Image (spheres, rainbow, N blue to C red):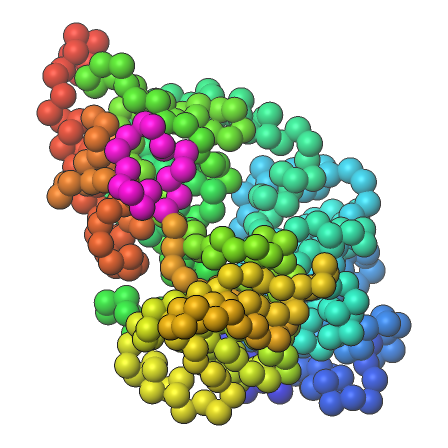
Amino acid sequence: MLDNDLKEQLRAYLEKVTHPIELVASVDEGAASQELLALLRDIQSLSSMVSLRTNGQESRKPSFAINRTGTDVSVRFAGIPMGHEFTSLVLALLQVGGHPSKTAPEVIEQVRNLEGEYVFETFMSLSCHSCPDTVQALNLMSVLNPNITHIAIDGALFQDEVDERQVMAVPTVFLNGQPFDQGRMTIEQIAARLDSNATLRDAEKLNAKAPFDVLVVGGGPAGAAAAIYSARKGIRTGMAGERFGGQVLDTMAIENFISVTYTEGPKLAASLEQHVREYDVDVMNLQRAEQLIPATEEGGLIEVRLANGASLKSRTVVLSTGARWRNMNVPGEQDYRNKGVTYCPHCDGPLFKGKRVAVIGGGNSGVEAAIDLAGIVEHVTLLEFDSKLRADEVLQRKLRSLPNVKVIVSAQTTEVLGDGQKVTGLAYTDRSNGQGQRVELEGVFVQIGLLPNTDWLKGTLKLSPRGEIEVDARGETSVPGVFAAGDATTTPYKQIVIAMGEGAKAALSAFDYLIRLPVTVVEEEEMVA
């Protein structure tokens, strides 16, 4: 099952196991069960601390549990956790085997103190790059707290259950049999949802923080670069964002990041966070900014109010709030969001195996999505508003070579159709003749670009008609002391490498702004002291 290189890597990891592990397989005679057994036997052969038995009684087959022998510590998988979930498997083996997690001690303590019974089920797909974060978070929680159980379910192997529970996007999490949430989640986010007092405690801690010299709002590539360049200047730097990595976390293949021939979004995001944490940066995750209050005088403090009620103050601010997927804004889109309407072909594509789907958008993202989906689904209809596709020619040639893809240009989507539970079709207008058309299908993948995350800034600083933060060549905004960088700004070409450069520039501009401020009497006394 595992090649020799992977076996040697896994053998090295298993040397860190300090408690005996028992793998308990629930299998039948099917091919998937035999594949799972081959994987588990490979794992067993790599360490004397691992045993295997095959008489598990789980109703889902194939599935298996990783148990800490003699205890109730357990992690479970329904399926064969390879692909993006192989890392989840390795971490589960280590954590059940007693190897400590690198999660912050205060988060670990928070999870251990959760009261109540929590039975989590996560539907994921092996091609989903967003799923491992959620799976790994819930796995660790089940190791830390005996009141928490979790099973990760490969939706592609349990299609009947996926259909019955109307799972049309991954990851989808159920808690105690009821829908809990969808999308990438960290252990901090889940623990905060379950801990009713977490928001209040967090707000109190944030309010107590001293003012920063530079406060970076946003956790994507632009924000990471700004934080690093600020911290390197030796000034007090804070970084507040909803999730570290931002839009990069939702990006699969990255092949145009200079000097790196290929990487994936989550891997790059992890590297960014690791680099930021090498410096003295106060990183505040899970924080959504809701209001920017400019300073009342030159060199005064700028205030950023957060969704949890807390406020952060700083002498300068770098806004790097990024962008989000653009919606079609047609009837039915929101009604059937995650019920057939989705925005991530890599994550959700396997759930539409053998079905008919549409891709909306003829740029690089849309054409790449259609190419990927064509290898999974029965048929792809790509609809483009313009009279021609806008994707790179190399992608268009690949698209034209696929027999199960139909391209329709000059198509204006007008409605997502459904039966109240799931998508059944799509209506569009042929812009060449004005006639209405309808396509029968079961999934709609929207790939029509991005919108800047700047709604909270309206009326505070100058925005373009597209809602982008207007910046000059130095990254300065219309508000003194406030700078901006990345996809939320008017800087053209929304690319990772450009966002990083703009983030560094904004930080340097903020530092230059600070050193040119008039020195106050208080600051002179501090320097003498």
Question: Residue at point 47% right, 57% down?
Answer: 328
Q: Is residue 15 visible?
A: no
Q: Is residue 346 left or right of residue 74?
A: left
Nearest to the observer: residue 223 or residue 293: 293
Assign the C terminus to one quadrant of the image. Answer: top left
- Percent x, y of residue 480: 20, 26
- Percent x, y of residue 394: 30, 83
Q: Is residue 80 magenta?
A: no
Q: Is residue 127 left or right of residue 114?
A: left
Assign the N terminus to one quadrant of the image. Answer: bottom right
Question: Residue at point 77% right, 63% down?
Answer: 165
Q: Is residue 456 magenta?
A: yes
Residue 289: which quarter of the image? top left
Question: Residue at point 31% right, 50% down?
Answer: 487
Nearest to the observer: residue 274 or residue 181: 181
Residue 505: which quarter of the image? top left
- Percent x, y of residue 155: 69, 71
Question: Residue at point 58% right, 81% down?
Answer: 377
> Which span of residues is magenta-colored?
452-467
Q: Is residue 342 above or below residue 199?
A: below
Q: Is residue 446 visible?
A: yes
Q: Main secondary structure of the magenta part?
A: loop
- Percent x, y of residue 341: 58, 62
Q: Is residue 498 above or below residue 204?
A: below
